[in-house]
Image: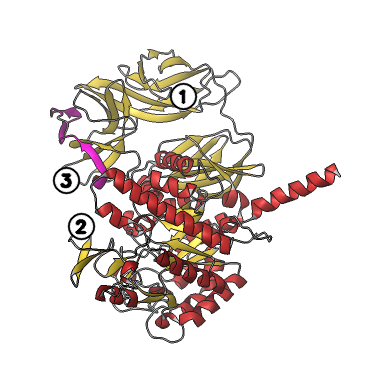
Amino acid sequence: MKRLLLAMLGLSFLLGLSSCGNSNKKEIVEKCILNNSRIGYEINVNSFADSNDKDNLGDIDGITEKLDYLKNTLNVDVIMLSPINESNSHHGYDILELSKIKASLGGSRAYKKLLKEAHKRDMYVMLDLVINNTSTMHPLFLEAKKGNKKYIDYYRFTDTNKPNTYPVADKFYYSALGSETADLNYDNPKVYEEILDILKKYLDLGTDGFRINDAEKLYAYDELDTKDSSQASIAKARGLALINKLNHDLKLYSPNTFIMLDTGGSSISYNASAYSKGVDTIYDSFTTSSIAEGVRLSSGQELIYAFYDRQNRYFSNNQSNISSIALSSKKDIKLTDKLDNDLNKIKASIAISMLLPGLSWIYQGDELGISNSSILNKEEYPYKWGDEYQISSAPHEYNDSIASVNTQLNDKASLLSFYKDMTRLKGNNLVLRYGNFKPVKLNHEVASFTRSYRGKTYLIAINTSSDSNSVYYGLNNPKEIYSLGSTINGSEIKLSGYGISVLEVKNVKAPDVEKIIFHYKGNKDYMLYEWSTGTPRWIKLEEDEDGYMSCEINITGLNLSEFEFLIGKKVNGVIESSGKKKIPIEDNGNKVCHVFINEDTNLVSYEIPIDTTFPYKPGQIIKIFAWKTTEDGSFYNTIIDNGIIRFGLNKEIDNINIVIFDSSSPIDWSHTAHVSNDIIVNNGELVTDIIWR
């Protein structure tokens, strides 16, 4: 009897793991987006595909006709439709009637058919949901502005002109998104009840989930009324409470309902709070910006550890959620524009987004390389199925030259073919669909991490630099899962510029090395600068019998897998470097690693003291922005040690800015906390006094 009871308890536990959402119903729902979906595709309905009506507009029937393409070519599990409700605009975010599907898109008949055909293919359908406002042409708002007492409390009005309010009759209405929309008043319980009833009807049709658009603006008017940050926090908390209630009530009605939040540029702490309230995922703008930026700046390791930090903060109170990772979004510029149409950089970004854990989203057209920031708002940037546009008025010059779906599918080197490879890899491989994630330090230019599931571990290494990189790991007879521009030699992974390697590895462990012996062939005046132990130090090199400059470094107990070395000497107050290299540590039986470096670079290592006026705070990130007078500049990494900022740059640099960012901010000029005055560089020497501002 005891054994039978334990067996029943074990079965209940396993069933609980496979369920999607909390329910008071007896049945266990096993099929749902949360458990089964890892590739998502966001569709702008107006510009994706036209059905046989040939009215030069995309529609829902057009999407239904392309489901096999999405499923078989891109391994898509879930599609998300831009707003399909009645509205006056092309984009659909000014809702005239939430309960009705736009007739020009096919109405409810077409939507029901789409749901049926998607579910036949084990695909899910989500709606981009606008519930924080309506159009100012909505029948309820027209009644409210007349003063109809039954409806005036459906919206937020004020007697005085305030920020983000607009005049109507003898009063003003709030709108966080512009004069054509009006914010709903969720202090009125009838508003919530009507919205909930409408969403239940969409669930009854078979809708699988919703993305709540601009979720952080549900109580935006409370923020607008005050400059008090505590009141603004209360406003966000009220919004999260409303989301929590909606999430709970929808899952009580239909346990497999998937809830995603679009939180725009809200803080990491806001997103973490939202996850703790039970939403399934958040369309994470921080990851969206950091992947492309990490590839653009060749800082792969940094972007992976930043993602890891966000994961820890997001899921500290709820481990059943998943990330949503995208490279473009409806509010963002296209991936091709972020990376200057550089196909190699674009592919590296795609690989990162697909191989990280969570739900990887493709924004319509990214897989073809469609450019321009406004696929959402303009009909002239449609999807390109054939050599001629199916939907077209005035194609963008760059997009007009992009190869069509048919052409790219026949070209193994095309962007679409690469997306096909990556989505097949994630879609069909259990380790990459469901595996645990752990960052790995291999090289600051290499995005590297492991994914582990049911006894299997994959090592992923993606070079974010145009330069070749060699990285080392305890591979132990690796099995190659995927390779693009990578080769394996023992424990060495050689990555060409933007190369990608996915390997199955076993018994992963960094070698237990006690010391290294360093050999350098070059200028005898040079010293070794070593910083991988966390305490940067200069080490004098002695000449060996073979003519190499050498030293022995004791690293007992550190159990490191690599060191980073800089060879240099002081010139004009800075360190002129002949080589910088990450060195693998291998156990050759004597617990020793021999390292050989020849002079092959021309770097300068700068050391800038921090004085009392330096505005740095712990937890912030310090970057160098360096440029030649005749060229655009770039951001570079630094290290901070004992009151000194250290960084290495090419000798040809003319100008330097030292810039501070908050750790949660994207690395671009709009997010700078502080910046130094321009520093002029002459032949490697700093010739300008540093004044912080």
Question: Outermost residue toward the bottom?
Answer: 53
Which percent across, then down, holds residue 111? 50, 77
Q: Residue at x 45, y 16 (%)?
A: 553
Q: Which quadrant is the C terminus positioned in?
A: top left
Query: What residue appears at the point 53 percent right and 62 percent down from the top-left corner?
Result: 250
Distance of label 3 from label 1 (alpha carbons): 38 Å
Return the disc, 2 or 3, that comes first in the chain's sequence. Answer: 2
Q: Specify few, some or many for label 3: CA neighbours under 10 Å numbering under 14, 14-19, or 20 or more.
A: few
Q: Residues within 10 Å of mark 2 (few under 14, many from 20)?
A: some
Looking at the rendered image, the disc whose residue lies closer to the viewer, 2 or 3, is: 2
Marks 1,2: beta carbons within 8 A? no
Q: Which residue is mark 2?
A: 163
The part of the chain drawn in magenta is 670-690
Q: Nearer the viewer, mark 1 or mark 2?
A: 2
In this picture, residue 593 sits left or right of residue 504 = left
Relative vertical location of residue 677 with respect to residue 311 in this rendering, above or below: above
**Residue 677 in magenta?**
yes
Looking at the image, residue 386 lies above or below residue 659: below
Q: Secondary structure at mark 2?
A: loop
**Of residues 89 and 304, which is closer to you in this image?**
89
Q: Amino acid at mark 1?
A: Val
Q: Amino acid at mark 2?
A: Pro
Q: Which mark is residue 630?
A: 3
Question: Dot 1 corresponds to which residue?
Answer: 595
Residue 536 sits in quarter: top left
Residue 33: x %, y % from top left: 56, 60
Relative depth, front residue between 64 and 228: 228
Q: Residue furthest right?
A: 1
Question: Toward the viewer: 686 or 136?
Answer: 136
Q: Is residue 127 left or right of residue 234?
A: right
Q: Is residue 541 above or below residue 6?
A: above
